[in-house]
Image (cartoon, grey):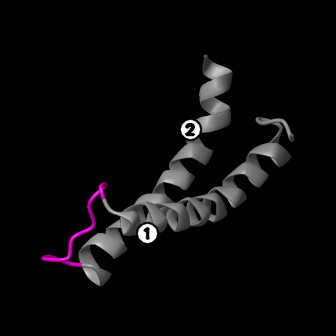
Amino acid sequence: MREATEADVLSLTAFEVGLFAWMAIMAFVLVPEPHSLRPDTAAYWFLMQIGMVIGFATAWPANAWLIRRGTKEAM
């Protein structure tokens, strides 16, 4: 359990920071009320896919560092 935590907490946190930051910007800045983003709209899911790509980009440096450090194995 400890090894899995060491290998994944940093990379998952970096991914979530990128994803949630993107969705927060979309929800509160670019698409504010009354045109709110709701999970029952196609726009929400489209923007979520873009957010996942951004999350991947923000997790990349953390994963590269964990692989270089030997904490995580390359796939």
For label 2, the crowd category at 10 Å Cα-Cα, with few meaning under 14, some 14 to 19 and many 20 or more, is few
Q: Quadrant of residue 28?
A: bottom left
Count up the numbered dots.
2
Q: Position of residue 19 (x, y in %)?
A: 48, 60
Question: Which SS does the magenta portion mostly show?
Answer: loop
Type of the residue with mark 2? Val
Type of the residue with mark 1? Trp
Q: Are marks 1 and 2 in contact (CB under 8 Å)?
A: no
**Helix, strand or loop status at disc 2:** helix
Mark nearest the camera among 1 and 2 is 1
Q: Position of residue 31 (x, y in %)?
A: 27, 79
Image position of 44 (left or right of 12): left
Tell me the residue at 63%/56% (across/down).
59
What separation in Å lies between label 1 and label 2 (alpha carbons)? 20 Å
Q: Which mark identifies residue 9? A: 2
Q: Quadrant of residue 7?
A: top right
Q: Which mark identifies residue 22? A: 1
Magenta residues span 32-40
Tell me the residue at 21%/78% (across/down).
32
Image position of 8 (left or right of 17): right
Farthest top residue in view: 1
Q: Is residue 50 magenta?
A: no
Who comes first in sequence, dot 1 or dot 2? 2
Q: Compare residues 56 and 68 and report the one nearer the observer.
A: 56
Tell me the residue at 39%/69% (across/down).
43
Q: Position of residue 48 (x, y in %)?
A: 46, 61
